[in-house]
């Protein structure tokens, strides 16, 4: 009798387990056939909207752009820079009421200021005013303020925004490949295949989000010799770098002094070609960019939706 009772309990247990497994398989089928496609449609719409805004400002082929987000002189003969003899021209520029997309910036020491317009993944137009040290001005024949611009016909592409756009384009590729695989297959995709897709999407979304948050600022040595989109070109002793950090636009200017020999008791010196370049001034300005803040919120939403979907599939590990 005891043996029969044990066998009956075992049968009931196995029956309950088989019912639970069958229930999980039905839930998995619903997850793959209904929930996952709905998620991919929602994610696709969010990505499409983001990419449309990015492509609105993407320069056509042949337009000049900086490949590292940094613009500097290349220490060669170039168009002379306009130098403003009157430092009063450095006063804060008035807000442009006719162009709400215009971003004004000024450093705390007011040694760099200006305004810029961001369109898509590029700065479509901008003006920069950089105050030069008196010693440097006298030694190299420059006076007052260096002034340069970014023109609409030669926009300044920001690599961080370009990276974010490229990552989202890859997300679209992964989703298209998934759809094509489903059409060619007659069976439900495995839990491993679904997690593989979600893993790829998460990787690209994290990289896109981080590109707007984190950035390795190039050193003055990295900036020397970079191609320029500025007009007129800055003098060789002035380097300009524009980058994004936590969805804020940051503009940094370095002023250098060239030495034929390695100077004594000096810091921030690097070698460029046959000269020793000393950084004598470093100023940084920043400003909020509402469009980038909204883009960051949207990327975080995409990440949250993808992480939730990945968690759902994790529950079916070892079952289907």
Image (cartoon, helix red, strand yellow):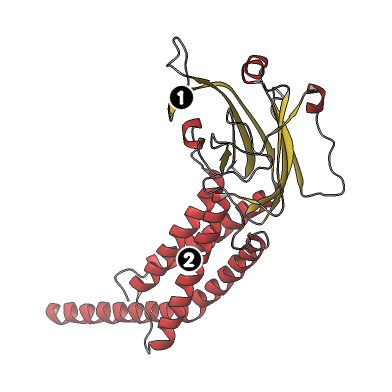
Q: Residue at x 54, y 37 (%)?
A: 74
The residue under the point 81% across, 49% down is 100
Q: Residue at x 71, y 21 (%)?
A: 143
Q: Earlier in the sequence, mark 1 or mark 2?
A: 2
Q: Crowdedness of circle 1 by 10 Å Cα count: few (<14), some, many (20+)?
A: some
Residue 278, x across and y down, in percent: 51, 21
**Residue topped by disc 1:** 275
Q: Secondary structure at mark 1?
A: strand
Residue position for label 2:
170
Query: Quadrant location of the C terminus?
Result: bottom left
Kindly report the distance in space between the C-alpha atoms of the residues bearing marks 1 and 2. 43 Å
Closer to viewer: mark 1 or mark 2: 1
Q: Nearer the viewer, residue 268 or 187?
A: 268
Disc 2: CA contacts within 10 A as few (<14), some (14-19) or many (>=20): some
In this view, which residue lies farthest toward the top? Answer: 265
- Tally of numbered discs: 2
Q: In x, y percent, where is residue 10?
A: 21, 78
Let me know if residue 217 appears in the view. Answer: no
In-front residue for pair 108/78: 78
Label drawn at residue 62: none
Position of 96 compared to 216: left or right?
Answer: right
* Image vertical order of residue 23 relative to residue 153, above or below: below
Q: Position of residue 89 (x, y in %)?
A: 81, 27
Quarter residue 236 falls in: top right
Q: What is the x, y in percent for residue 243?
A: 58, 41
> Can see residue 164?
yes
Task: Name the element at disc 2.
Answer: helix
Q: Which residue occupies 21% across, 82% down? A: 8
Q: Quadrant of the N terminus?
A: bottom left
């Amino acid at each position: 009798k005891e043996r029969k009772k044990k066998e009956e309990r075992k049968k009931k247990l196995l029956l309950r387990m088989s019912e639970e497994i069958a229930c999980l398989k039905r839930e998995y089928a619903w997850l793959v056939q209904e929930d996952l496609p709905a998620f991919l449609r929602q994610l696709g719409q969010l990505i499409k909207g983001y990419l449309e805004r990015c492509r609105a400002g993407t320069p056509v082929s042949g337009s000049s752009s900086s490949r590292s987000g940094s613009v500097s002189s290349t220490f060669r003969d170039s168009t002379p820079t306009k130098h403003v003899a009157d430092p009063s021209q450095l006063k804060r520029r008035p807000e442009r009421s006719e162009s709400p997309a215009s971003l004004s910036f000024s450093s705390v020491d007011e040694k760099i200021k200006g305004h810029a317009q961001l369109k898509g993944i590029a700065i479509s137009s901008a003006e920069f005013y950089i105050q030069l040290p008196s010693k440097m001005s006298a030694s190299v024949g420059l006076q007052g303020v260096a002034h340069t611009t970014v023109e609409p016909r030669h926009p300044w592409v920001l690599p961080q925004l370009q990276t974010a756009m490229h990552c989202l384009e890859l997300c679209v590729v992964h989703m298209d490949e998934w759809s094509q695989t489903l059409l060619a297959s007659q069976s439900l995709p495995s839990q491993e295949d679904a997690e593989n897709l979600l893993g790829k999407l998460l990787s690209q979304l994290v990289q896109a989000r981080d590109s707007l948050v984190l950035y390795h600022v190039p050193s003055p040595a990295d900036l020397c010799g970079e191609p320029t989109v500025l007009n007129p070109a800055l003098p060789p002793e002035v380097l300009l770098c524009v980058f994004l950090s936590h969805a804020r636009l940051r503009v940094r200017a370095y002023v250098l002094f060239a030495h034929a020999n390695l100077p004594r008791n000096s810091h921030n010196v690097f070698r460029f070609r046959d000269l020793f370049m000393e950084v004598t001034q470093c100023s940084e300005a920043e400003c909020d960019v509402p469009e980038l803040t909204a883009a960051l919120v949207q990327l975080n939403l995409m990440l949250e939706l993808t992480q939730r979907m990945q968690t759902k599939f994790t529950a079916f590990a070892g079952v289907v």
